[in-house]
Image (cartoon, rainbow, N blue to C red):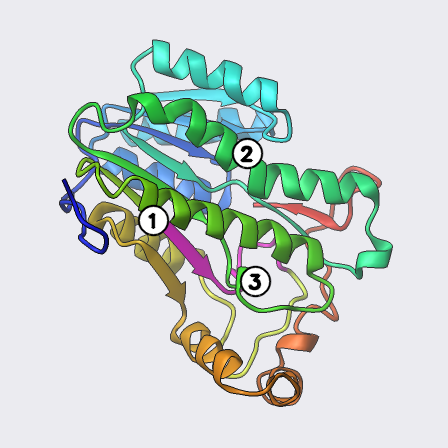
């Protein structure tokens, strides 16, 4: 039995394992899927709500030699998650789960529609829980199991115009790391939570860079997250300025921290000009999907 604080055994790769990645039709999800294919995963299951992009991504992954299964899944729908998870288990199971899919809203709380609040919390917070809960009984059956959850630095720092997004990512982070502690007794399962700042995938278009914190490149984030998953690293804050921010936020009186975050670092104005991707559909221009 592992004791609290002891690391799981490191994995060299996902070769021979079954990998499931959500939000994998584009952006970081597709990068995760490509890495799984390059490492020789036995099967790469990709989920996304965009059927056309999902089909294109599957073909691209097969060109890399991957054994790919693509499924359209609306992660805002609990029933779809559980039904599709049951099918994946029946068809070979899952060893590595990457909870990557996410949506972001960038407006004042007063401007949020009820549907935006519901969708953001459902996809960012509830979907990882429902999916992991469905897969957990068979996770680690091969002697190697991993759950990688993409949270956000927004989970750690309050930020105007990100209230619902920050809340959803705070829930995801707290749940993921609490699950890690519950599974400390299982040496075969590693739980990793990744909290990056803004990533240049398009979903944060218009967001401003902060002091010493430029927009992060998706390839860099995926590489760090993947290595953390293989190693079983519990929590990754990136870049290093996120750790500095956490120190200052804890050490300074609240008025002093508000001044630093607002006037020095620029956190409190980082979403003032957020636009997100240009949407082809109407009514969802402020709801962006990773």
Residue 133's spot in the image, x, y percent? 44, 28
Give the mark, 1 or 3, whose residue is nearer the N terminus: 3
Q: Secondary structure at mark 3?
A: helix
- Residue 200 belongs to magenta span: yes
Front-most of residues 54 and 193: 193
Give the mark, 3 or 2, whose residue is nearer the N terminus: 2
Q: Main secondary structure of the magenta part?
A: loop
| Distance of label 3 from label 2 (alpha carbons) | 18 Å
| Distance of label 1 from label 3 (alpha carbons) | 17 Å
| Distance of label 1 from label 2 (alpha carbons) | 16 Å
Q: Which residue is mark 3?
A: 154
Residue 56's spot in the image, x, y percent? 49, 28
Q: Which residue is mark 1?
A: 192
Q: Which mark is residue 127?
A: 2
Q: Residues within 10 Å of mark 3 (few under 14, many from 20)?
A: many
Are the two marked residues, 3 and 2, in contact with CB atoms closer than 8 angstroms? no
Q: Residues within 10 Å of mark 1 (few under 14, many from 20)?
A: many
**Quadrant location of the N terminus?**
top left
**Quadrant location of the C terminus?**
top right
Residue at image x 58%, y 19%?
80
Q: Secondary structure at mark 2?
A: helix
What's the magenta region? 193-204
């Amino acid at each position: 039995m592992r004791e609290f604080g002891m690391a799981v055994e490191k994995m060299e790769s996902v070769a021979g394992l079954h990998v499931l990645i959500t939000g994998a039709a584009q952006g970081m999800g597709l990068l995760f899927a490509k890495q799984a294919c390059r490492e020789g995963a036995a099967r790469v299951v990709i989920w996304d709500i965009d059927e056309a992009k999902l089909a294109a991504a599957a073909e691209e992954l097969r060109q890399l030699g991957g054994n790919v299964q693509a499924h359209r899944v609306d992660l805002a729908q609990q029933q779809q998650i559980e039904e599709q998870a049951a099918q994946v288990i029946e068809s070979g199971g899952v060893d590595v789960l990457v909870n990557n899919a996410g949506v972001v809203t960038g407006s004042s709380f007063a401007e949020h529609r009820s549907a935006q609040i519901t969708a953001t919390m459902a996809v960012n917070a509830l979907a990882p829980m429902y999916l992991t809960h469905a897969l957990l009984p068979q996770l680690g059956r091969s002697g190697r199991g991993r759950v990688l959850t993409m949270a956000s630095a927004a989970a750690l720092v309050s930020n105007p115009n990100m209230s619902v997004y920050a809340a959803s990512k705070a829930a995801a982070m707290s749940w993921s790391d609490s699950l890690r502690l519950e599974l400390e007794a299982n040496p075969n399962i590693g739980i990793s939570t990744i909290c990056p700042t803004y990533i240049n995938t398009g979903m944060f278009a218009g967001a401003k860079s902060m002091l010493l914190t430029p927009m992060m490149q998706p390839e860099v984030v995926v590489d760090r997250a993947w290595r953390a998953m293989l190693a079983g690293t519990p929590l990754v804050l990136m870049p290093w300025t996120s750790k500095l921010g956490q120190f200052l936020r804890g050490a300074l009186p609240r008025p002093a921290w508000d001044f630093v975050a607002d006037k020095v670092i620029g956190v409190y104005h980082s979403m003032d000009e957020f636009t997100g991707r240009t949407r082809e559909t109407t009514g969802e221009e402020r709801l962006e999907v990773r």
